[in-house]
Image (cartoon, rainbow, N blue to C red):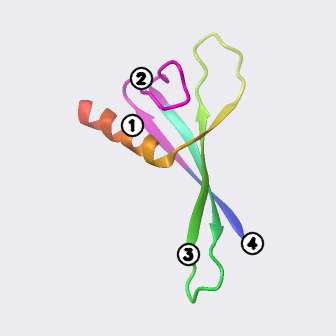
Amino acid sequence: MTQRTVPSTITFNKPFHLSGFEEPLQAGTYKVETLEELIEGLSFPAWRRIETLLFLLQPPGQPKLTQVAVVDPIELEEARSRDQEAA
């Protein structure tokens, strides 16, 4: 099965909440990677999302460690929409 990674970014103007995190995540621009797999057997290329990764920002003064979380892409988009409405 063929897979691909689609990179993108998402920006939040205010701290936001996602399930699985006790504290709100800080405002800023986050790197997002979506892993997709090719749906085979069709007469046209179609991709199915397997997982969405959010690369977490480190608070100022913390070591520069890369932390990645698997997130629900729908919940992430809903959080972004709420952030844009509040701006």
Q: Amino acid at mark 2?
A: Pro
Q: Earlier in the sequence, mark 3 or mark 1?
A: 3
| Residue named by callout 3 | 46
Regarding mark 2 in the picture, which secondary structure is present there? Answer: loop
Please report contact status of discs 2 and 1: CB closer than 8 Å, yes or no. Answer: no
In terms of depth relative to the viewer, which is nearer, 81 or 10? 81
- Which residue sits furthest bottom? 43
Q: Amino acid at mark 1?
A: Ala
Question: Horizontal placement of 1 versus 57: left or right?
Answer: right
Q: Earlier in the sequence, mark 2 or mark 4?
A: 4
Q: CA distance from mark 3 to mark 1?
A: 27 Å
| Residue named by callout 4 | 1
The spot of residue 77 in percent (x, y) is: 41, 45
| Residue named by callout 2 | 15
Q: Is residue 38 visible?
A: yes
| Residue named by callout 1 | 79
